Amino acid sequence: MPLSPKERLAIQRQAVPAQDPVARAANFDEVNLGYSTALAQLEAERCLQCKNAKCITGCPVSVNIPRFIDFVAKGDLPGAANSLMADNCLPAVTGRVCPQESQCESQCVRAVKGTSVAIGALERFVADWAREHDADTAAKAPPSGKRVAVVGSGPGGLTAAGELARLGHDVTVFEAFHTAGGVLVYGIPEFRLPKAIVGKEVERLQALGVKLQLNAIVGRTFSVDELRRTHDAIFIAVGAGLPQFMNVPGENLKGVYSANEYLTRVNLMGAWNADSRTPVLKGGRVVVVGGGNVAMDAVRTAKRLGATEAIIAYRRGKEELPARLEEVHHAEEEGIRFELLVAPTRVEGNAEGWVTGLSCQRMRLGQPDASGRRKPEVIPGSDFTIACDLVVSAIGTRANPLLTQTCPELTLNKWGNVVVDQDLMSSIPGVFAGGDIVRGAATVILAMGDGKTAAKRIDAWLRRP
């Protein structure tokens, strides 16, 4: 018998089981262990099945959240899987790395006077169940006879490819690296998103008909013009992978990495292995500059690689940290040291050119700047140095011009991002773009939202009279 609203409200949010902090800080196994079936059903019972479900509008890929959760509550896991996977091409990914707390869960009516339904944890549970039971029954339209090139196999590109394949189009994804997944494989650590999970999601898209062409650098191996001659439409989803540095003296010393390089070496190239052909410095004291999710990934990776101390240096306070609350909480549990309200002024080094420390100044928060956040101001005479052996710059990325500089017909903005119209079409007819190459550095789920939208717009373009 269905529970009454009062009975549902009485159920407390179920915590997601996780590895012990001390144990996990020394391994790369996934931190969160996921719900059991019993916990998932109990959490699903908390959903009030709102008629005007604001959680759906809070989701960039418009997952019908109450519907799949209702299936879970009723014990119909095949139904839940079919419902979820009809809306989301990469549910096992978003169930792990999507910032639900600021999107769908923030719109949950239960969050007004308590805690929201654990939508992300339920999404992960259903996606994992579907993978383990080979439960993918996505309907596919008849072949359209149209060919689409997707440039980049990150979350936006894979989402667009999956949606376009379902719509009956012949889709090929061109990926510069030797492995598909983009930031999902090179940027997000194993302990947050296991590579096997990404691999299975990619295999599922391939089973749907998506083709992959790896080691294909559009802008070098192929030009956009060449792809236009062999395809009816193009979706550019190359991300924003050009790292930004601190612009302080000493950044060229040995032992200074961008977060992109550091995480790519570890995540995609196996640099944790002593026999790796792409080594990375390990141990010692590591300082990661930045406060976003990438910074948390880098500092927690350093801890797992044996850092004697792993430190975050961020120029604002804890409340202003842009990283997910869960990631900050996990970092604290794992013994990460936070140096807040500090700004680097110089990377110190020895005569051999190796890093020995990071000189900083203490900051205080002043009046809000153009972004609406309180602007950090230097406290005079507050200089100090953090002794360290490795510095990682995780202060953001911008558009890589590798593709865009070889295609002058593309209109770019002042940051080098592709300019698109309301249909995500660029200045070149039939060439669409989305994700970070349009938005600037953003989240996985926003890129996926662009991929899903672009697929609809591309389909309409291809089927126009």
Image: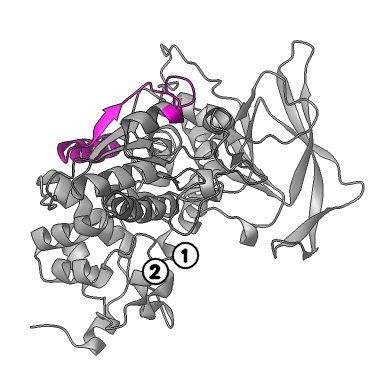
Find the magenta span and give its range: 196-225
> Mark on residue 105?
2
Residue at the (27%, 58%) spot, across then down: 123
CB atoms of marks 1 and 2 within 8 Å: yes
Residue at the (33%, 24%) spot, across then down: 214
Q: Position of residue 343 (x, y in %)?
A: 76, 44
Where, by quadrant of the figure, is residue 406 drawn? top right
> Mark on residue 212?
none
Q: In the rendered image, which residue does mark 1 sit on?
A: 102
Q: Quadrant of the N terminus?
A: bottom left
Q: Secondary structure at mark 2?
A: helix
Residue 307 seen in this snapshot:
no
In the depicted view, which residue is nearer to us: 293 or 23? 293
Q: Position of residue 369 (x, y in %)?
A: 76, 62
Figure check: 79 above or below 98? below
Measure the alpha-carbon separation of dots 1 and 2.
7 Å
Residue at the (49%, 16%) spot, across then down: 279
In the depicted view, which residue is nearer to us: 108 or 409? 409
Specify whether residue 451 is painted magenta.
no
The reply, left or right, for residue 238 in relation to residue 39 is right
Q: Neighbour class for label 1 at 10 Å: few (<14), some, many (≥20)?
A: few
Residue 116 seen in this snapshot:
yes
